[in-house]
Structures are given as structure tokens and as C-alpha cells.
Amino acid sequence: MQTGMEMSAAVAVGFIAGYYADGKLGTSPWLALIGSALGIASSLRIAFQAVSRAGEKQTKNDK
């Protein structure tokens, strides 16, 4: 549950920051797209870390 919220928040924050910067700089929609892409990359990193932690727990339980 926590991992899903972190992933959603990463994408939302990236998009919102890009959207805000687009409004200030007049570069619409490029910074929103870049912010979204960075948020997606960040959410993939969060997912990878969660899978790694789960794998470590499983390895400890198997011993």
C-alpha cells in the first residue's frame, strides 16, 4: 500500500512541478512532460527498491 502511494506521489509531484514551471516560463507542455517522465522514472526506482527489500526478507526467511 505504501509503495503504491509513493509511486503515485512521485508522478503527481513531477507533473505538477512541470506544469507550474510551464506556466511561469511559457514552455507548455514540455516541462510537464519532462516532469512526468522523471516522476515515472522515480516510481520505477521505488518499485525496484520494494522488490529488493522483499527479496532480502525472503532470503532471510529461507535460511
Image (cartoon, grey):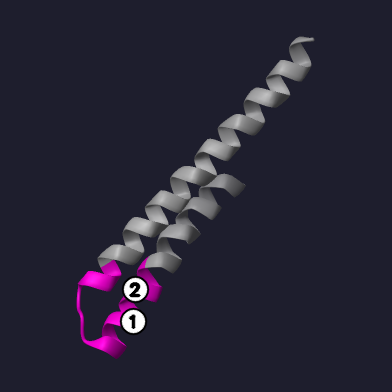
CB within 8 Å, label 2 to label 1: yes
Locate residue 31, reporting x and y percent. 28, 72
Instruction: Establish if 41 lies above or below 59.
Output: below
Q: Quadrant of the C terminus?
A: top right
Query: At x 58% / y 39%, what residue is drawn?
Result: 49
Tell me the residue that label 2 is attached to. Answer: 18
Query: At x 46% / y 55%, what residue is drawn?
Result: 8
Cα separation between marks 2 and 1 = 5 Å
55 within the magenta span: no
Q: Amino acid at mark 2?
A: Gly
20 within the magenta span: yes
Q: Nearer the viewer, residue 16 or 5?
A: 16
Give the prevailing secondary structure in the magenta stretch: helix
Describe residue 58's horizontal placement relative to residue 29 as left or right: right
Outermost residue on the top side: it is 63
Locate residue 50, reporting x and y percent. 59, 37
Question: Where does the magenta region start and end?
Answer: 15-32
Query: At x 46% / y 52%, what residue is drawn?
Result: 42
Instruction: Establish if 43 lies above or below 39.
Output: above
Q: Amino acid at mark 1?
A: Ala
What is the secondary structure assignment of the residue under circle 2? helix
Tell me the residue that label 1 is attached to. Answer: 21
What is the secondary structure assignment of the residue under circle 1? helix
Q: Quadrant of the N terminus?
A: top right
Instruction: Establish if 6 lies above or below 48.
Output: below
Query: At x 45% / y 67%, what residue is drawn?
Result: 13
